[in-house]
Image: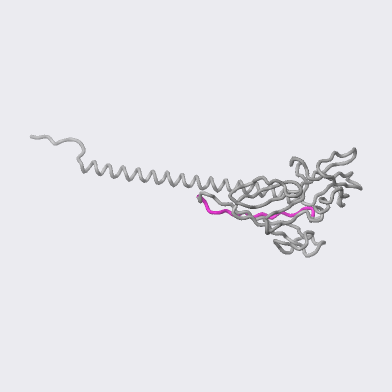
Amino acid sequence: MIRASKGFGLIELLIALALSLVVILGVAQIFIAAKNTYVSQNTAAGMQEDARFVLSKMIQEIRMVGMFGCIIIPPTNSTVDFQAAQEAPISWDNANQKLTLVTADVGGSGGAPTWTVVSDCRNSATAYTGARTPATGELAFPIRRLIYSFSNNQLMMGVGTGTPTQQVLVNNVSAFNVSFGVAGSTTDTAASSYSSNPSDPKLIRSVRLTLTLTDPNNRVRNQTFNVVAALRNRLL
């Protein structure tokens, strides 16, 4: 009697290979989907972090707009350019996409100030160009003129008078818009409407910032972030 041959036949081998291929393809698809999800989530998180950094910095600066010392009196002007900054400490050039702020140096860590207001916090306050050392019984308040500008898909910032050198804050910006909460009169502390080009800077009470970031590799959709910051020195 001839004994039956042991082992796999050609048909069984082909079936096993086909099943193995299906399993491998399934595992590969799961791996690719997991990788794509990780990459997209990581990209979105990076965009959110960039927006958080830039907008939180701008909000901090906007809240200090118009803060020129410890007493609410106009500082004596030692320079003409500071007088103009006093009268309009915040402005938006819609044509050139530039936001200008004149603000107290938060924390005193912003480098060389544009001006310094020296005050005895009782009766007098004087503005000087650049840094200034206060005398005994006086305090010095560093003031900076900041210009945020949007061009070539970059949001940049410069410090100083005239047209200062711009440093890039964030890349891959597809849109940056600014609008102002405007009061009905100079005595009102609350905004009654929003405008991108208010006729009187003294009526500005808050600022709405809209920032849209894009992924150059199209891994995630564009993300738009909106924040509103109040000018604390206009709410007193």
User: Residue at coordinates 53% horizontally, 49% vertically from top-left?
Assistant: 216
Point out the image quarter for the C terminus: bottom right
Q: Is residue 235 above or below residue 136?
A: below
Q: Position of residue 215 (x, y in %)?
A: 54, 50
The answer to whether 193 appears left or right of 139 in the picture is: left
Q: Position of residue 108 (x, y in %)?
A: 77, 41
User: Residue at coordinates 87% horizontally, 39% vertically from top-left?
Assistant: 134
**Tally of numbered tags:** 0
Q: How is the image coloured?
A: one colour
Q: Residue furthest right?
A: 123
Is residue 220 part of the magenta span, yes or no?
A: yes
User: Residue at coordinates 64% horizontally, 48% vertically from top-left?
Assistant: 52
Of residues 109 and 35, the one nearer the viewer is 109
Is residue 50 part of the magenta span, yes or no?
A: no
The answer to whether 193 appears left or right of 185 in the picture is: left
User: Residue at coordinates 45% horizontally, 45% vertically from top-left?
Assistant: 34
Q: To which quarter of the image does residue 211 belong?
A: bottom right
Q: Position of residue 131 (x, y in %)?
A: 81, 41
Of residues 124 and 31, the one nearer the viewer is 124
Q: Which residues are magenta?
A: 219-233
